[in-house]
Amino acid sequence: MAQQLVKKDDDRDDEAEYSPFMGIEKGAVLQEARVFNDPQLDARRCSQVITKLLYLLNQGETFTKTEATEVFFAVTKLFQSKDMGLRRMVYLMIKEISPSADEVIIVTSSLMKDMNSKIDMYRANAIRVLCRITDGTLLAQIERYLKQAIVDKNPVVASAALVSGIHLLQVIPISFCNSVYFAHPMYATCSFYAPSLQTNPEIVKRWSNEVQEAVQSRAALVQFHALGLLHQIRQNDRLAVSKLVTSLTRGTVRSPLAQCLLIRYTSQVIRESGNNTQPGDRPFYDYLESCLRHKSEMVIFEAARAITELNGVTTRELTPAITVLQLFLSSSKPVLRFAAVRTLNKVAMTHPTSVTNCNIDMESLISDQNRSIATLAITTLLKTGNESSVDRLMKQITNFMSDIADEFKIVVVEAIRSLCQKFPLKYRSLMNFLSNILREEGGFEYKKAIVDSIVILIREIPDAKETGLLHLCEFIEDCEFTYLSTQILHFLGIEGPKTSDPSRYIRFVYNRVHLENATVRAGAVSTLAKFGAAVDELKPRVFVLLRRCLFDSDDEVRDRATLYLNTLGGDGSVVETDKAVKDFLFGTFDIPLVNLETSLKNYVPSEEAFDIDSVPKEVKSQPLAEKKAPGKKPTGLGAPPSGPPSTADSYQRVLSSIPEFANFGNLFKSSEPVELTEAETEYAVNVVKHIFDRHVVFQYNCTNTIPEQLLENVIVIVDNSEADEFSEVFSRPLKSLPYDSPGQIFVAFEKPEGVPTLGKFSNVLKFIVREVDPATGEADDDGVEDEYQLEDLDIVSADYTLKVGVSNFRNAWESIGPDYEREDEYGLGPRESLAEAVNTVINLLGLQPCEGTEVVPPNSRSHTCLLSGVFIGNIKVLVRLSFGLDGPKDVAMKLTVRSEDETVSDAIHEIVASG
Amino acid sequence: MILAVLFANAEGNILIKRFHGVPAEERLHWRSFLVKLGADNLKGVKNEELLVACHKSVYIVYTILGDVSIYVVGKDAYDELALSEVIFTITSAVKDVCGKPPTERRFLDKYGRICLCLDEIVWKGYLENTEKDRIKRLIRLKPPTEF
């Protein structure tokens, strides 16, 4: 028989025609399912029908509610059969169908009977099915049996009960439960089906003693399942988890899977024990280290990874873990190689020198068949490599790049960019590499990643500029992406004229005018004009080229050429272009584009030309505020240096344009806008606080949201009775505030010099309101005086500190020295969590968190946070905050400040003491 | 959690699929993603040679067995090594049921048994059994021999 089968298998072509499910059709199978109702059951036939039903379900077939119910009821009849094979299929089928709450009752008694059967396998399966379909009420009824089953001497029964417990313990949100239910093909069309499964964690939590006993089982899998369940039951009780880990790490765990779980739980306990312990006497480290010598690779790897992920792991602690991972790198099993290189890749980010020893093994992985492994190996090498190995590495990567997918290539390109930033002297070979891969086939994202990298290198490494620009020029000769071509042309226009020989780029740019689509042609015309404006010697030749563009088929290209020819100097002689013209053509608008857009939309074509000066310069606070995201890395073409000015720059410009503020000195800080009105009120007002050494200027950004009103002589009356150290020195009203055209009011106060003076200000908006006819846009002659109460405004301590990060806090701390160090302890009282306390203090001080210390690991009982910044008067200040939980919720804090001035150190303490 | 176990034939048609804790709207995406992953990488791979990949925080271990490709997807505790244990159990059980690395026809012939094996190996996203001999007995409702 076996020989016959083998022979049949060899003839594959014949086989394809005889698929057992060929032509299978739902209706026919449902008809066949009627055999379940036969008084004389044919077990073999019934099993075949169930198999067909399973196949249909796996093929995504959907059953209506009636069909599903009929199948379920028919299947329950099969409990009459004593055939073991069929019974096993019945269990599976019921689980697959997942009957609804009102149907479960039909099968419950049969399953309960099986659960008490003398045949162990009936018990195990009945438990699994019951727990799958049961609800809370039924669970309470069968709890007694389940508790017995957990400690059953048959490991299959015990495992069935334990794994059921794991599932029952998980609280499934109803919505998700629904989606899972309805996603089941059987119920895809049953819109009114409600989930019957309501897990009951409280019941499962009562099984703790039995589960504890099962953890000691001699059966490996029972131990694994029991440990998983016990941890879930106790996961919110840190002491209990700690005790569990302590006892098990001393005892013996038979199953490697359970051992892996134990290592994970141990890591959790180590993490939660916080940073109190000195490196070297870290609890449980010895256990983790001993697991590195376990016979199972899975356990060894788990332990190695746990060690590499320890908080503040030392090189000495890392070494044994790195050694085993290094051995795995040359394993014959791809999964082990992948796991090892993935872990080492992570370690390389924090401890590159520790991974250096593995570089030779890692290099051999570059040719690994599994591209994920090869990519991880390369990116790790790029992180750990030294300057002398760069060239060799590049050679190896070149061969590798041709046969990996774009997403891997992008990872490699980004790693090369970082490497080049790390070793600027190696720019030549790295830039060559980037230009070579730029010529090869690839999708948009990949090409963009390369172009961005080249741009960043050009910006950061002056020597790389000319080569980099030429690479980009060559790229646009054959670039299929309009976006990239226009961005590169724009970049060339900025950087090209500053090079030693700007004329060499003109050919590349002018070629675009002939060979590209209109968008790129228009971009090329602008770039040509930039060269003409910036390099006087080139102007005559550029003019010749621009004149040729006057006959372009596209109006935008022609318009640009005309504009540039008419504004840049008429006849194109070698004369210096007027600065005002340059600013007009290539400078940035000092107005937010959104304001310009609004004004242009409101502009009605008439004899009076559109006046760009009429566009309000008020900065729409929100979008720009978002741009100030901390720690934003320089991007490539997305953010050219000549791009829109930063918020601070634009504030500085606006303020310096007002003569009354001219003698205020340098602007120290401008706050984020503070809303003084509710959203969607008649008048929207926010305020930006500008801090100077001896002055504070409030910039009220006002918007009139009523089309039927025109506001005139708008002022803000500021009451500073709760800020008596401030005295008002100047107020600039707004003459007119038409609908949806924002305007600004400025009020300036004098304050004691260099002191972080605090105060509360109440504000009332006063104005004359004139009715406007929306049809004609004309306002009534008569206006009525009115006022509008605004929210109060506070000057807080954080207004006097600037967030300025330091790259290496420890070095900065040492270099500033202990001369003006001030240290004190504070009780912060009961807090929601440690993280909340840390955030509150960071916000109070308004300083920049360093090295990611603003993130508090979950369940920590202590935390250290490092802050840096500049205090008013441009005094550098560094702060070290040590938090600890004192009692269940009380937070205590030690504040250590170092600064360049003792009064500033004291001031920071003062802020905290009064905050 | 073992998020998915998938069996597909040489053309990428799904033979068996099991998802656990994967929202319904994401399943199709996972199906297509895995089948494409297999089409890109499984050509010329030896039987049972494991391939591994990461997608976001999720691990994928996959292999080929005869005409059938097998994919196992997991996250958290079910990382690449745990999944290799799962897939090893699955391939052993399938070979055991089919007598050798199966052709598609043979796989479909033994479809019911393979579904039962899978039911014994992975239960709602958790690894339940790892030994093929034990699984072989359990699907016939026979107690394990070591007991």
Image (tube, coloured by chain):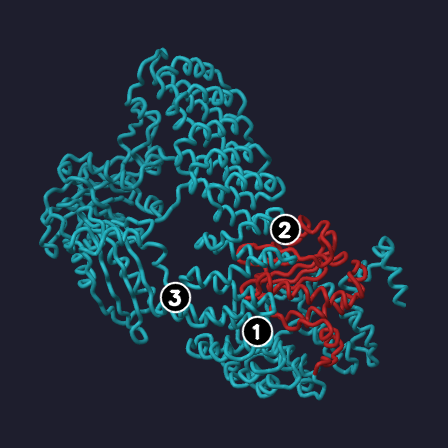
Chain colours: A cyan, B red
Residue behind mark 1: A258
Between discs 1 and 3, the one toward the N terminus: 1
Q: Quadrant of the N terminus of chain A?
A: bottom right
Question: Residue at coordinates 41% horizontally, 14% vertically from top-left?
Answer: A543
* Callout in the foreground (1, 3): 3
* Callout in the foreground (2, 3): 3
Q: Amino acid at mark 2?
A: Asn
**How far, Cα to Cα, is label 1 from label 3?**
27 Å
Residue A311 in the image: above or below residue A730: below
Between discs 2 and 3, the one toward the N terminus: 3
**How far, Cα to Cα, is label 2 from label 3?**
38 Å
Residue B126 in the image: above or below residue A351: below
Residue behind mark 3: A279
Question: Residue at coordinates 90% horizontally, 64% vertically from top-left?
Answer: A4
Place residue A292 in its image quadrant.
bottom right
Is residue A350 in view from this perspective?
yes
Q: Chain of mark 3?
A: A
Q: Amino acid at mark 1?
A: Ala
Q: Amino acid at mark 3?
A: Pro
Give x and y (percent) for residue A351.
44, 55
Q: Give left or right: position of A459 versus B19.
A: left
Residue B75 in the image: above or below residue A804: below
Is residue A637 in view from this perspective?
no
* Circles 2 and 3 in contact, beta carbons < 8 Å: no
How crowded is the residue under tag 3: few (<14 C-alpha within 10 Å), some, or many (20+)? some
Give x and y (percent) for residue A245.
48, 76
SS type, badge 3: loop
Q: Chain of mark 1?
A: A
Near-viewer residue (B57 or A322): A322
SS type, badge 2: loop
**How far, Cα to Cα, is label 2 from label 1?**
29 Å
The circle drawn on residue A370 is: 2
